[in-house]
């Protein structure tokens, strides 16, 4: 990857931001943090809760930009981890994500708009959505869209982890 590219690993309660050729920063927020916070009170979440969840992600990224202003000039962003992979799978409608897959912002917005109005019972029928991400997928959408909005990205690469690729190979 190009020096300066951000690699953002999405975990339950944190985002680990690595700068290619630079340092690593951990932000104390992730999909499960949003689920237990602003997205906890209704299914599907209320519009104000979604706005608050997006705002929390952007606030944490703003703090990072204050600490490390050079990242605003990032040549690109790759998101990784099971949460990012789950969103990509919903967007493509299957468990098979092409290598080097780029999630377009318009597509991420569409997935978000579709899932954000579905209660869990309906959400679980979306093609490609893994069962263990049915409840967290809306929070995941908030994380990824917050990243895309904060850095004004038209797309983000979904970097498949080696473990996920191995798991996909064994399930075929």
Image (cartoon, helix red, strand yellow):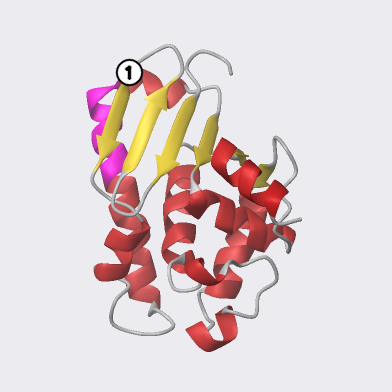
Magenta highlight on residue 65: yes
Quadrant location of residue 131? bottom right
- Figure check: 66 above or below 36: above
Magenta highlight on residue 43: no
From the image, give the main secondary structure of the stretch colored magenta. Answer: helix
Q: Do we see residue 57 in this rendering?
A: yes
Quadrant location of residue 46? bottom left
Instruction: Tell me what residue is drawn at x 61 percent, y 64 percent.
Output: 111
**Nearer the observer, 172 or 73:** 172
Instruction: Tell me what residue is drawn at x 36 percent, y 65 percent.
Output: 51
Instruction: Tell me what residue is drawn at x 65 percent, y 63 percent.
Output: 90
Quarter of the figure that contains the C terminus: bottom right
* Relative to 62, 157 lies left or right: right
Please report the bounds of the magenta region as a residue range: 60-68
User: Going by the picture, which residue comes out furthest to the front?
Assistant: 170
Quadrant location of residue 44? bottom left
- Figure check: 147 above or below 106: above
* Relative to 120, 61 lies left or right: left
State the image coordinates of residue 65 (x, y, percent, origin top left).
30, 29
Quarter of the figure that contains the N terminus: top right
Instruction: Tell me what residue is drawn at x 46 percent, y 27 percent.
Output: 6
Residue under circle 1?
23
* Numbered label tally: 1
Q: Do we see residue 52 in this rendering?
A: no
Mark 1: few, some, or many residues within 10 Å (few <14, many ≥20)?
few
- Figure check: 62 above or below 33: above
State the image coordinates of residue 171 (x, y, percent, origin top left).
70, 57
- Figure check: 130 above or below 101: below
* Relative to 115, 46 lies left or right: left
């Amino acid at each position: 990857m190009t020096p300066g590219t951000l690699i953002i690993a999405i975990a339950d309660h944190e985002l680990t931001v690595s700068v290619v050729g630079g340092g690593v920063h951990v932000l104390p927020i992730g999909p499960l943090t949003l689920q237990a916070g602003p997205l906890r009170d209704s299914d599907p979440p209320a519009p104000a809760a979604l706005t608050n969840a997006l705002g929390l992600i952007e606030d944490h990224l703003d703090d990072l930009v204050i600490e490390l202003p050079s990242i605003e000039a990032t040549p690109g962003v790759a998101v990784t981890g099971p949460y990012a992979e789950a969103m990509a799978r919903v967007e493509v409608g299957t468990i098979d994500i092409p290598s080097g897959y780029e999630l377009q912002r318009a597509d991420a917005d569409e997935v978000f708009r579709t899932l954000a109005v579905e209660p869990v019972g309906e959400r679980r029928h979306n093609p490609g959505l893994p069962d263990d991400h049915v409840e967290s997928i809306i929070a995941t959408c908030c994380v990824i869209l917050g990243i895309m909005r904060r850095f004004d990205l038209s797309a983000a690469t979904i970097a498949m982890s080696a473990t996920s690729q191995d798991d996909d190979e064994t399930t075929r």
